[in-house]
């Protein structure tokens, strides 16, 4: 018997939105800086030629380059799908496989292996408030807590409870809350 869940990585709508917004903002700032330097209006709906190059144009250019660099970083994490993977619980082999994609390099593929018999409980962590967190962890007998849920928008309480109950029943362990 195998129980498997898939984890969405950085390819989500919010990341596409922020990468695009920051890129457009960065380009706008760079064009404003260049317009103030060359005294040519490169942005048709604004008048950046009225800015003084020192210090306003330089600062606008700096912020623009910084925004473009951050946007490139976000687009690369989207292209590489950092954080995606799966959690696989295989009763026939008695193993747990947790796989995630990282940044390119020697350790791009992160693969963790554990024995099912080492699992103490399924841990639910719920924190409400301004920055809510709702996560499921696998708690091992040596007190190590391994996160199983994806980062991002918190799941509904009923959904996280159902997932935790289903996993705990499959593994034959108890549920704890933190």
Image (spheres, rainbow, N blue to C red):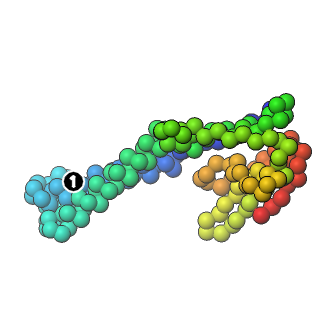
Q: Is residue 51 above or below residue 116?
A: below
Q: Give the x, y percent position of residue 78.
A: 48, 42
Would you say 106 lies left or right of 43 here?
right
Would you say 168 lies left or right of 13 here?
right
Q: Is residue 90 above or below residue 9?
A: above
Count of picture labels: 1
In this rendered view, identify the residue nearer to me: 111 or 123.
111
Q: Give the x, y percent position of residue 49.
A: 13, 61
Residue picked out by circle 1: 31
Q: Residue at x 70, y 48 (%)?
A: 148
Q: Give the x, y percent position of residue 167.
A: 82, 44
Would you say 148 lies left or right of 110 here?
right
Does any portion of residue 156 appear in the rendered image?
A: no
Q: Locate residue 99: give its quadrant.
A: top right
Q: Residues within 10 Å of mark 1 (few under 14, many from 20)?
A: many
Q: Residue at x 14, y 65 (%)?
A: 53
Q: Residue at x 18, y 63 (%)?
A: 57
Say which element carries label 1.
helix
Q: Give the x, y percent position of residue 25.
A: 33, 55
Would you say 113 lies left or right of 79 here?
right
For the N terminus, the quadrant is top right
Q: Residue at x 83, y 59 (%)?
A: 176
For the C terminus, the quadrant is bottom right
Q: Locate residue 88: give its quadrant.
A: top right
Does any portion of residue 8 appear in the rendered image?
A: yes
In this rendered view, identify the residue nearer to me: 144 or 24.
144
């Amino acid at each position: 018997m195998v129980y498997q869940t898939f984890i969405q990585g950085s390819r989500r709508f919010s990341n596409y939105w922020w990468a695009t917004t920051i890129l457009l903002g960065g380009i706008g700032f760079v064009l404003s800086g260049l317009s103030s330097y060359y005294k040519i209006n490169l942005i048709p709906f604004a008048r950046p030629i009225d800015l003084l190059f020192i210090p306003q144009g330089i600062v606008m250019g700096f912020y623009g380059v910084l925004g473009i660099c951050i946007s490139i970083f976000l687009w690369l994490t989207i292209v590489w799908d950092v954080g995606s993977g799966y959690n696989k619980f295989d009763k026939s082999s008695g193993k747990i496989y947790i796989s995630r994609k990282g940044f390119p390099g020697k350790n791009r593929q992160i693969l963790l292996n554990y024995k099912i018999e080492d699992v103490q409980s399924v841990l639910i962590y719920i924190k409400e408030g301004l920055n809510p967190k709702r996560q499921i962890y696998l708690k091992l007998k040596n007190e190590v807590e391994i996160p199983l849920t994806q980062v991002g928008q918190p799941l509904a309480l009923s959904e996280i409870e159902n997932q935790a109950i289903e996993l705990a029943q499959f593994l034959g362990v108890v549920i704890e809350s933190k």
